[in-house]
Image: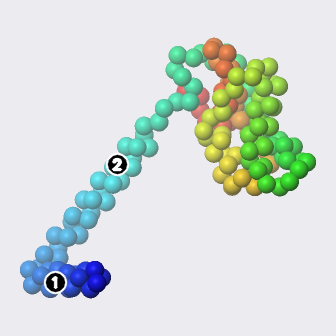
Amino acid sequence: MSEEVKSVEKEEVIEELKEGGEEAEEPKVEEVKSEELEEEKLETVEVEAPFIPEDVEIREERIYIIPLWRSWISGRGYRRAKKAIRYLRRFVARHMRNDDIKISPKVNELVWRRGIRNPPRKIKVKVVLGSDQIVYVLPADEDAE
């Protein structure tokens, strides 16, 4: 019943527009709305906090290509991305001699991009040891801030 009411209302609006000649005003309103939405999108993209806190100095920086395929050699073919993240943590802890590791959301997204069953075979990362004795794992192509 509500569909019938909507169709009747649409017909009435169409007739009013034809009679009143208000068709030219409607597209202008839509254009303004689309411009406002584009500006809002741009504003939200620009606001992005750095992963490493600003008060932390970089003590050591290395770039590694981590073979994630080694994490799923044995066992079933599901939950591979989860195992790959665990392997990445173990790899970085072994090479940096520090267990306090923070993985960047961008690196996490790279591993999980293709789903839980099909992570990348290898990944290139930048590993940074900060003055606060925390190891940060960043994508290799990202600029240090």
Instruction: Name which residue type carries label 2.
Output: Glu
Quadrant of res 24: bottom left
Residue 95 percent coordinates (x, y): 81, 25
> Considering the numbered disc 2 on the image, is that residue within a helix, a strand or a loop?
helix
Label 2 crowding class (10 Å Cα cut-off): few <14, some 14-19, many 20+? few
Figure colour scheme? rainbow
Residue 52 percent coordinates (x, y): 57, 25
* Residue bearing the label numbered 1: 12
The label on residue 72 is none
Q: How many marks?
A: 2
From the image, which quarter does the C terminus lie in?
top right
Q: Nearer the viewer, residue 138 or 103?
A: 103
* Residue for point 80% across, 37% down: 87
Residue 90 percent coordinates (x, y): 80, 31
Residue 140 appearing in the image = yes
Instruction: Name which residue type carries label 1.
Output: Glu
The label on residue 40 is 2
* Residue for point 17% across, 80% down: 13
Q: Are marks 1 and 2 in contact (CB under 8 Å)?
A: no
From the image, which quarter does the N terminus lie in?
bottom left
